[in-house]
Image (cartoon, rainbow, N blue to C red):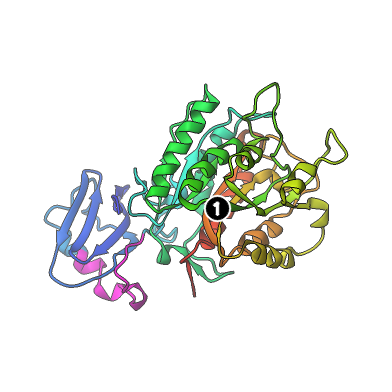
Amino acid sequence: MEQLFSCHGGRLLQASLWKEGVHLGTSSGLSVLRWSGTCQRPLTRAFSMLSWAHSGCLTGSVPTLIKNHLQWSDISNRWASGATCNMPPSSELVAQSVGVCTMMRLPLQSSPEGLDAAFVGVPLDTGTSNRPGTRFGPRRIREESVQLRTVNPSTGALPFQSLLVADIGDVDVNPYNLPDSCRLIREAYQKIAAASCIPLTLGGDHTITYPILQALAEKHGSVGLLHIDAHTDTADKALGEKLYHWTPFRRCVEEGLLDCRRVVQIGIRGSSMTLNPYKYNRDQGFRVVLAEDCWLKSLVPLMGEVRQQMGDKPIYISFDIDALDPAYAPGTGTPEIAGLTPSQALEIIRGCQGLNVVGCDLVEVAPIYDPSGNTALLAANLLFEMLCVLPKVKTA
C-alpha cells in the first residue's frame, strides 16, 4: 500500500491503520507511528486535520492526532481477514476537486505487485480509422471518476472491502509506431498477469485489446470474450495494414487467443460494404447479437444465456463506448446511430457477476467530441461496474 496519506490544503486525504501503527504521508513524505496493539487489516479513511497539522508538520503532534481522530473502534469486524485495502476518500470529508487525478482518487502505484486488481491507462489512438483523440481518453475518464463512490447499492458489491485496488498509471506507448506500441502494451500486461493482478484498462483505441489478450493468453490460455461494440472489429486489413482498431479480434483468432465457442458480440450495427458482414464471425463460432435485436427490451435474459455459454473458464470483457447510442456517448471516433442505452450497458456488465473475469477494458473514448464530459463519465461508471463483478468481490 503506497503513500495512502497526503497533506493538502489543511486536510489529510487518506489514512490507514496498520497492525504496527499508523502510516502518515504528508507533503514531506511518508512517516510511520508505531504502537503496541493488534490490527490485522488496515483501515483507510479520510478526515479533517487539526489546525496545527499541515505541510509535513506532524512531528511531535501525531499522538494527539491519533488520540482525537483514530480509534480502534473504527475497525469493523468484517475487516479481520488480514488483507489490506485501498479506499477512495469520501467526498463528505474531502472535496472532489482535491487530490491527484487517479481513477476514483485511488492511490497511484508504480507496480501491480501485491494488487488484486488495477486500473491502467493505454493512451493510444494510432490505430484509429476515423476521428482521432482516444489517446486523451484515460485522462478524461480519471477526471470524471471523482464522482464515483466505494460501494454499489444496486448490486450490493463491496469491491474495495474485498480487493486491493490501485491505479498503476499509463503504459508508456509509442504514438509514432503502432507495432512497437503493441509490443510495449504486451510487455506491460505480461508483468500485470505475472503479478496475478486483474487489469481494468482505460483506452485508447480498440487496437490495444490485441496485445492485452496476447499477454493474458500466456497465463490463462485461450479465453472467452464478451465484446460490446457497434463493430465486430474482425476486418482483415486496410490500405495493406493488418493492425488497426478494426482488426484486433481477427488477429486474436489467428493466434488462438480466443475460445471461439465462448465469444459473444453485442450491439453490432451500422452500414457495410457487403450484405453479409458477419459471416466471418459466425463461421468462427461467435454469437453476434445485433443492436436491433436489443431495442426496447431488457438484456437480463440474454445475459443469462451468456453466463451459461461462458461457464467457469476465463473470460475477458471488452467494451467499446460506441456500443452506446451517440445520444448518450457522442465522444467517440466512429459513432453509429441506434445503439444500446446506458441501462442496457449496466445489465450486460452486471450480468457477468459470477463469471471468471480475468481482465476488462473500456475503449474508444475521444473526449474532444464531447465537451460535456458525459461520455467519459459513462466510461468511468462502466469501469466501476466491471470492478464490481470481478471474482472474489463480496456482496452485502
Q: Is there any visible trace of residue 285 in the rendered image? A: yes
The residue to which callout 1 is attached is 383
Residue 66's place in the image compared with 337, above or below, is below
Residue 257's place in the image compared with 315, above or below, is above
User: Image check: 222 left or right of 195?
Assistant: right
Q: Is there any visible trace of residue 98 in the rendered image? A: no
Q: Position of residue 6 (x, y in %)?
A: 29, 49
User: Image check: 223 left or right of 103?
Assistant: right
Q: Which amino acid does label 1 sit on?
A: Leu
Residue that appears at 47% across and 66% down: 393
What segment is highlighted magenta in the picture? 66-85
User: Image check: 154 left or right of 101?
Assistant: right
Q: Which structural element holds mark 1?
A: helix
Q: Residues within 10 Å of mark 1 (few under 14, many from 20)?
A: many
Q: Which residue lies furthest to the right in this view?
A: 275
95 or 87: which is nearer to us?
87
